[in-house]
C-alpha cells in the first residue's frame, strides 16, 4: 500500500513538474514575439536551448534549410509546423549576410 501511495505521489509530482516546466523554457525571452513563436519553442527547444538558435554560428544557411536539418536530426514537426517555424525565424531572426 505504501509503495502504491509513493508511486501515485511520484506520478503526480512528475505531472506537476511537466506542467510547470512548460511555459518557462530558459532563454525563451531571447526569441522575439511573433506568429509561430510558440510552435518554435515547443519543437525547437527539446534538444537545445533557444540561445543555440539565436546565437547560431553558421549564419549563411537560410532558415528553411536549418529547420530541415533539425528535422533530419529528429525534430518532430508536421510540414505545416516546419513552414511556420521557418517563416517565424526568417522574420524574427533575419539572416545576416555572410
Ligand atoms: C532532435 C534534436 C534537435 C531538435 C529537436 C532541434 N535541434 Fe537544433 N541542433 C541539434 C543539434 C544536435 C545541434 C548541434 C549540432 C549541429 O549544429 O549540427 C543543433 C544546432 C542548432 C543550431 C546551431 C547551428 C549553428 O550553425 O550554430 C540552430 C540554429 C538550430 N539547432 C536550430 C534549431 C531549430 C530552429 C529547431 C526547430 C525546428 C531545432 N534546432 C530543433 C539538435 C536538435
Image (cartoon, rainbow, N blue to C red):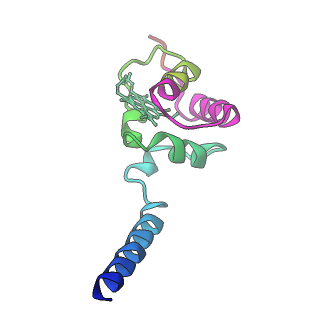
Residue 85, position as x, y percentages in the image: 60, 35
Residue most extreme to the top: 98
Along the line of sight, which residue is nearer the eye, 8 or 48? 8
Magenta span contains residue 83: yes
Q: Quadrant of the C terminus?
A: top left
- In the displayed structure image, the side of residue 17 where residue 84 appears, left or right: right
Q: Quadrant of the N terminus?
A: bottom left
Q: Which residues are magenta?
A: 70-95
Residue 55 in the image: above or below residue 66? below
User: Can you tell which quarter of the image residue 80 is in?
Assistant: top right
Residue depicted at 50% across the width and 22% down the height = 66
Residue 19, position as x, y percentages in the image: 47, 67
Residue most extreme to the front: 1
What secondary structure characterizes most of the magenta part? Answer: helix
Residue most extreme to the bottom: 1
Residue depicted at 55% across the width and 42% down the height = 40
Residue depicted at 53% across the width and 48% down the height = 42
Residue 45, position as x, y percentages in the image: 44, 43
Residue 41 in the image: above or below residue 4? above
Residue 84 in the image: above or below residue 64? below
User: Ligand 1 appears in which quadrant?
Assistant: top left
| Number of numbered labels in the structure image | 0
Amino acid at each position: 500500500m505504501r509503495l502504491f501511495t509513493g508511486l501515485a505521489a511520484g506520478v503526480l509530482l512528475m505531472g506537476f513538474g511537466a506542467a510547470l516546466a512548460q511555459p518557462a523554457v530558459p532563454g525563451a525571452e531571447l526569441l522575439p514575439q511573433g506568429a509561430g513563436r510558440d510552435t518554435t519553442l515547443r519543437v525547437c527547444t527539446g534538444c537545445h536551448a533557444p540561445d543555440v538558435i539565436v546565437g547560431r554560428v553558421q549564419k549563411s544557411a537560410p532558415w528553411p534549410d536549418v529547420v530541415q536539418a533539425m528535422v533530419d536530426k529528429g525534430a518532430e514537426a508536421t510540414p505545416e509546423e516546419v513552414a511556420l517555424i521557418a517563416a517565424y525565424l526568417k522574420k524574427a531572426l533575419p539572416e545576416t549576410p555572410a
